[in-house]
Amino acid sequence: MYSKKVLDTFANPMNVGEIENPDGVGTVGNASCGDIMQVFLRIENDIIVDAKFKTFGCTAAIASSSIATEMIKGKTPEEALQVKNADVVEALEGLPPQKIHCSVLAEEAIAAAIADYRSKKK
Ligand code: FES
């Protein structure tokens, strides 16, 4: 039921782990499935120079976190907020309908990490 891209990304995920003293960290969960996703950002001169994740979740959630963290590197926080779950689904060459919420989790975790970064900057 998963695309080859999802399975390959799940098997060899990029950006797994934590960033020490991150500039922004966001943790989100989905109440219905119980999955949790955490995104860490390193932001220098308003550019996301590194992004990592820790996800306790399904195949689609891990593949979504991997692709989404890769997609936002090199972007400004503003640009990263434009990366929506539909873009993650497209990059993964599709997700089954019941797994779309897993990509939403990635969008939400990034938004939460950027909100954290902005709140610390003030
Ligand atoms: Fe909930 Fe994938 S089943 S994040």
Image (cartoon, rainbow, N blue to C red):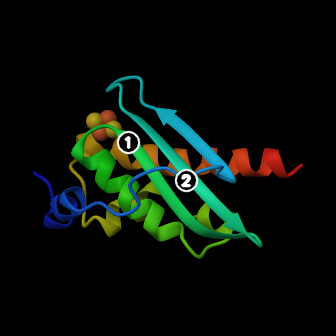
Precedes in sequence: disc 1 or disc 2: 2
Residue at left offset 10%, top offset 51%: 1
Q: In terms of depth relative to the viewer, which is nearer, 105 or 44? A: 44
- Residue 75: which quarter of the image? bottom right
| In this rendering, position of residue 109 left or right of residue 32 | right
Query: Mark 1 sits on what residue?
Result: 55
Residue type indicated by callout 1 = Thr
Closer to us: mark 1 or mark 2? Answer: 2
Circle 2: element type: loop
Q: Is mark 2 within 8 Å of ligand 1?
A: no
Q: Residue 60: x percent and y percent?
A: 26, 48
Q: CA distance from mark 1 to mark 2?
A: 14 Å
Residue at left offset 60%, top offset 57%: 41
Label of residue 19 in the image: 2
| In this rendering, position of residue 6 left or right of residue 51 | left
Q: Residue 29: x percent and y percent?
A: 46, 31
Residue type indicated by callout 2 = Ile
Q: In terms of depth relative to the viewer, which is nearer, 57 or 21? A: 21
